[in-house]
Amino acid sequence: MHFVRLSMVALALVATAIAAEREPERPHGRAILSLMGAKMENGGSPDALASYEAIFKRLDANNDGWLNTKEFLEDGKYLTRQAREGIFRASDSDGSGLVTKDEYVVNRVITDEAKTIIQAMDENGDGRVAEDEFVTNVKIEDKKLAAQVFKEFDLNGDGQFVIPEYLRVWGQWAREAPVTARLVVKKDTYVLPKGWQSEDFRKRIREEKDCDKLPAPPKVDLVLVLRNTGKDPVMIWSGGGIDEPELAVTGPGIVVPDSLEAFSCSNSATTPQPVILPGDKFRVPIKSLNPGGFSLDNVYWTEPGEYTITATYPVWKNLPPHLPSLFKHPEAKGCVHFTCRWI
């Protein structure tokens, strides 16, 4: 008889850099910026926000609500092209190649505040911040932590940092969500149906056009545990049909349908998801390799070997009513590795 068996548990994080089951060596990036006096996306005054929106409107030559590379890079008249390229990349938070007004405004709020805070530490006005300037002037009482933060801003390790260096790190930290993710295994052994091990079964899955004729995907018993390690509430996705984790499964015997004529013949119910308060956990049970019920996403394992499952769930850093449309959602991930072998 064929079994799928858990061999190892690991953690993969996008939202944070915390290792499983241990405290972080330093606070989250957002927590560090808060210690430095940053308000991040909440830092823009009404006048500043109005100014940023006016600039975006002026740059959006065709008035389609997006900035493309021609409008921003080729037709831009300020700074250097290299600088504009850096700004465009930072603003394009979803990597679409286009910058929305919201993306542009958020980036301006974050970067302008960063410059204000850091430039105040530049005692000699040379455009560079040395370690002694940073550690002496930064609003971090723990000077050991301050020295560690300086080294993270000093990307090239030359003992000082300039605007492009610290903005790169600052922008990443400001967009972090203070959420850890851990995928917990409730059951570590699963029977692999004998009929799934044949080439005929694999061909049937690949060539099936009617989603109603697909067999049910493999059952699993996992729990994705999300923990809010920050000081502010966070919200997991609140609707729109995305109330189940998205799974990515890899391994030697993975087969998915690629000939379906319909996107889906089934759907999961959408239920409002709660806010996770600071220090609290939220558990998302996972009972199938296709937890969302979308047939196009059905995954089947069909032979022995090691398989990796990664569960992804969107989380929101901000809560309504504060500019809910402005922010993209980072993703918390948990990962497990399975071994499928003959018993």
Image (spheres, rainbow, N blue to C red):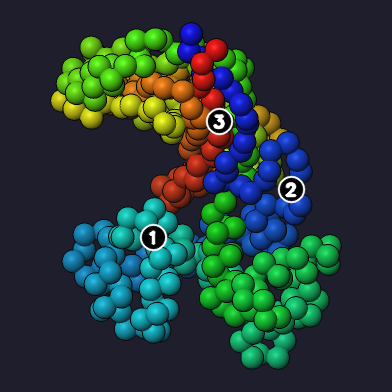
How far apart marks 2 and 3 lie (CA) works out to: 24 Å
**Left or right: 299 as drawn, with respect to 151:** left
Where is mark 2, residue-wise? Answer: 24
- Numbered badge on residue 57: none
Please name the residue shown 67% across and 67% down the image: 152
**Can residue 274 be seen at all in this image of the molecule?**
no
Where is mark 3, residue-wise? Answer: 337
What secondary structure is found at the residue carrying circle 1? loop
Please name the amino acid that badge 2 sits on: Pro
Residue 205 pos. (x, y %): 26, 21
Residue 163 pos. (x, y %): 56, 78
Where is mark 1, residue-wise? Answer: 92
Proximity of marks 1 and 3: CB atoms separated by less than 8 Å? no
Query: Residue 122's image quarter?
Result: bottom right
Residue 138 pos. (x, y %): 75, 71
Q: Looking at the picture, does residue 140 appear above or below residue 233?
A: below
Residue 232 pos. (x, y %): 65, 43
**Can residue 305 be seen at all in this image of the molecule?**
yes
Of tags 2 and 3, the one toward the viewer is: 3
How far apart marks 1 and 2 lie (CA) works out to: 29 Å
**Crowdedness near tag 2: few (<14), some (14–19) or many (≥20) residues, C-alpha within 10 Å:** few
Q: Quick one: label 1 or label 3, which is nearer the N terminus?
A: 1
Please name the amino acid that badge 3 sits on: His
**Crowdedness near tag 1: few (<14), some (14–19) or many (≥20) residues, C-alpha within 10 Å:** some
What secondary structure is found at the residue carrying circle 2? loop
Of tags 1 and 2, the one toward the viewer is: 2
Q: Looking at the picture, does residue 226 appear above or below residue 185?
A: below
Q: Quick one: label 2 or label 3, which is nearer the N terminus?
A: 2
Proximity of marks 2 and 3: CB atoms separated by less than 8 Å? no
What secondary structure is found at the residue carrying circle 3? strand
